[in-house]
Image: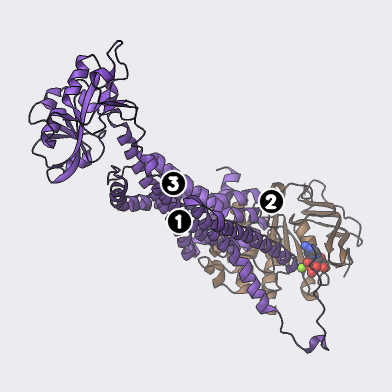
């Protein structure tokens, strides 16, 4: 080990020993950070799972890319489909409806694999497979999301699990769908190939009742559910902020308690740069430990909540969100980064104070008191500013974001205001009671102004 | 014999070995609410390894300030400080820290042990920092200071005298050229203080380090090899 690293290691050992002797403080710090990370990353996991479900639904059967033909009154007659094909139009039939399959209500989607446009087939790769025969012939094959497939007992069809199918949907051949839905001769809409041959007769002459609908913008679940997710995010962020305040307090307390130790370390020959670096490293170690615990906790919380959240999303918006949580390494990385960043923010003041801590205890406590009073005043001003911001938001703010900012401003203002208010109250208590010292009835002379 | 400005001419000494401490023309003043306060006004002194110097002076005369400047914990307004031939004044924070780590042992009035470390860890701390921890040497030192039975305790479980012995051991275990002690017995009762000071003087000279001892007590000062008095920013004979 090089002298510099061994010096840093010896210093780190001395700093970490503080926590061994102050386990309650350590627990407070770790729990604050772990809870903050858990709630934040748990919410992120819920949002990510729901969003990926929306993306899946939006991309299903090429809904986002293909135009379609619909009938204003609802059903497209199978005869219209036949007429269009005969006239040379490249169209493919789709039938959608709700059906009871094995005691569970599902969305039944019938398609015709032979005419289906490539973009739609790409969204259901199983249809590219060799067993197309099984797809048509009785009893008929169906594809469903693994989660749906597992809970479904459907004697009418043989089910295959496929991740590409949205939760709660069963994909079958159009004929099977017509039979199961009791909709012989009827279709929901026709998918239009992106490249139509030249010279086909216009739509009005072949199938005058049908209307051309451009690629799907309507079923944009992501937009529909935005406020729901913003709510969740705001909640997660607030929880994170509250956790950070706990961490901030724990780090600040540990800093105050170790002020003398920092001075001793410097007197014994630890350079300021090393000391600050080691304190930052200590913070990072604690943040990594707490962050990892927070991720495990957050995943647990999200897994626990997802079924209920999915049920609300389905009930409120008809969004097909699965009740089961996936694991995303990017999510874990972001959670850890949040824990590290949060710890740095919470400990930043202490690091800054250490960087400016004179190596000697002040000979005159006055100097320290003046500096401390100045920092208290700054804190009070910041709290006041945030309070005014909160007031303005309460008066003129609109919408969810403003509400969230209002809560955050109030919370921060309260946290910043506590130390100056406390100091003020203590100072009032410490002031000597008015006595006969001043003599006469005149006011006592004002104390000399503090010198800087 | 320690050289002190205004007392005697600089003694002849082996030119190949630099003095443990050489202070020349040190000046320092503070700005206070009553205006500038000159605390050191041209202080020079020199200490060889193995020598001890007792520094006396009224409270507020600048004894601690002088020690802090020697240790590189406070900047001077003018003059130079050399530890073992290396310049403390003018060095960077890292340079001053390195000089302290390897060359200067500090003993404070308040002991300043690290409360979360055991006596054993405190004792070897500066030596480890300096990268020259020798377990046998430290064990001998602990025995010499009579604290070998306390190694597993924490500072809060020790008496003041015991804590100060650990602090003395901590600085000597790093084998510094110079020990700076600022009223090391100020927080101890007289009997304990005498014992600790005996130990400090003996172990420092055994270790071949120079000792600059600040004390109020003429009785304690009499035990040192030389004495100096700080008055009006200058050193003179007591
Ligand atoms: N940081 C400082 N700012 C202003 N004045 C100081 C400071 N440090 C010391 N002093 C003043 O310098 C004088 C010498 O202090 P000090 O060296 O501690 O004296 P001693 O140790 O001899 O009692 C005292 O009057 C003290 O108030
Ligand atoms: Mg003093």
Cα separation between marks 1 and 3 = 14 Å
Residue B173, percent across and down? 62, 58
* Left/right of residue A426 with respect to residue A176 in the rendered view: right
Q: Secondary structure at mark 2?
A: helix
Identify the image quadrant of the N terminus of chain A: top right
Chain ID, mark 2: B
Q: Secondary structure at mark 1?
A: helix
Residue A172, percent across and down? 17, 31
Residue B10, percent across and down? 89, 55
Residue A20 shows in this picture? yes
- Residue marked by disc 3: A335
The colour chain A appears in is: purple
Please state which of the two labelled residues, at mark 3 or mark 2, is closer to the viewer: 3
Q: Is residue B222 above or below residue B66?
A: below
Q: Which mark is residue A239?
A: 1
- Residue marked by disc 2: B97
* Left/right of residue B59 with respect to residue A135 in the rendered view: right
Q: Are marks 1 and 3 in contact (CB under 8 Å)?
A: no
- Chain (brown): B
Cα separation between marks 2 and 1 = 43 Å
* Left/right of residue A310 with respect to residue A14 in the rendered view: left
Q: Are marks 3 and 2 on the same chain?
A: no
Seen as rendered, the residue at the extreme top is A199
> Is the CB atom of the residue marked by disc 1 within 8 angstroms of ligand 1's nearest atom?
no
Q: Are marks 2 and 1 on the same chain?
A: no
Q: Are marks 3 and 2 in contact (CB under 8 Å)?
A: no
């Amino acid at each position: 080990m090089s002298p510099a690293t061994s010096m840093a290691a010896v210093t780190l050992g001395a700093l970490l020993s503080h926590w061994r002797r102050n386990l309650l403080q350590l627990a407070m710090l770790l729990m604050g950070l772990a809870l903050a990370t858990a709630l934040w990353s748990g919410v992120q996991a819920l949002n990510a799972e729901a969003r990926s479900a929306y993306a899946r639904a939006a991309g299903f059967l090429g809904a986002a890319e293909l135009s379609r033909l619909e009938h204003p009154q609802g059903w497209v007659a199978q005869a219209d489909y036949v007429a269009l094909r005969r006239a040379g139009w490249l169209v493919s039939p789709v039938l959608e409806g709700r059906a009871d399959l094995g005691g569970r209500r599902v969305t039944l989607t019938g398609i015709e694999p032979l005419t289906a446009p490539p973009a739609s087939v790409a969204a259901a790769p199983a249809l590219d497979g060799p067993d197309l025969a099984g797809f048509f012939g009785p009893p008929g094959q169906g594809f469903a999301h693994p989660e749906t497939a597992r809970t479904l007992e459907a004697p009418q069809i043989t089910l295959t699990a496929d991740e590409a199918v949205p939760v709660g949907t069963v994909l079958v051949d159009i004929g099977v769908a017509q039979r199961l839905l009791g909709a012989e001769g009827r279709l929901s809409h026709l998918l239009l190939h992106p490249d139509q041959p030249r010279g086909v007769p216009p739509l009005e002459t072949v199938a005058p009742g049908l209307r051309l609908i451009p690629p799907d913008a309507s079923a944009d679940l992501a937009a529909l559910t935005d406020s729901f997710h913003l709510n969740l995010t705001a909640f997660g962020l607030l929880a994170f902020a509250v956790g950070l305040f706990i961490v901030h307090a724990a780090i600040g307390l540990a800093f105050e308690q170790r002020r003398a130790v920092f001075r001793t370390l410097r007197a014994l020959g630890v350079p300021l740069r090393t000391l600050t670096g080691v304190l930052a490293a200590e913070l990072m170690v604690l943040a990594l430990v707490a962050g990892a615990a927070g991720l495990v906790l957050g995943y647990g919380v999200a897994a626990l909540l997802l079924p209920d959240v999915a049920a609300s999303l389905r009930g409120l918006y008809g969004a097909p969100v699965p009740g089961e949580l996936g694991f995303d390494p990017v999510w874990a990385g972001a959670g850890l980064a949040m824990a590290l960043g949060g710890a740095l923010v919470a400990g930043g003041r202490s690091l800054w104070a250490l960087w400016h801590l004179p190596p000697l205890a002040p000979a005159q406590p006055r100097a320290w008191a003046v500096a401390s009073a100045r920092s208290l005043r700054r804190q009070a001003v910041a709290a006041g500013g945030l309070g005014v911001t909160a007031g303005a938001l309460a008066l003129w703010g609109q919408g969810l974001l403003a509400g969230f900012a209002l809560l955050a401003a109030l919370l921060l203002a309260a946290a910043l205001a506590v130390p100056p208010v406390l100091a003020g109250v203590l100072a009032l208590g410490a002031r000597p009671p008015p006595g006969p010292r001043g003599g006469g009835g005149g006011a006592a002379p004002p104390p000399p102004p503090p010198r800087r | 014999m320690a050289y002190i400005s205004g007392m005697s001419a600089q003694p002849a000494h082996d030119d190949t070995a630099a003095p443990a401490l050489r202070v020349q023309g040190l000046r320092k003043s503070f700005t206070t609410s009553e205006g500038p306060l000159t605390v050191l006004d041209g202080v020079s002194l020199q200490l060889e390894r193995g020598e001890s110097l007792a520094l006396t002076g009224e409270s507020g005369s600048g004894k601690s300030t002088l020690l802090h400047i020697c240790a590189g914990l406070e900047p001077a307004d003018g003059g130079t400080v050399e530890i073992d031939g290396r310049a403390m004044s003018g060095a960077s924070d890292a340079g001053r820290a390195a000089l302290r780590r390897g060359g200067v042992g500090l003993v404070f009035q308040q002991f300043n042990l690290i409360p979360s470390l055991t006596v054993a860890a405190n004792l070897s701390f500066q030596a480890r920092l300096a990268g020259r921890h020798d377990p046998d040497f430290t064990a001998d030192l602990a025995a010499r200071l009579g604290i070998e039975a306390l190694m597993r305790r924490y500072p809060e479980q020790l008496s003041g005298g015991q804590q100060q012995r650990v602090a003395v051991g901590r600085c000597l275990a790093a084998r510094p050229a110079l020990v700076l002690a600022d009223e090391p017995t100020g927080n101890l009762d007289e009997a304990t203080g005498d014992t600790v000071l005996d130990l400090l003087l003996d172990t420092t000279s055994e270790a071949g380090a120079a000792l600059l001892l600040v004390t109020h007590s003429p009785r304690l000062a009499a035990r040192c090899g030389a004495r100096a008095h700080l008055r009006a920013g200058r050193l003179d004979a007591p």
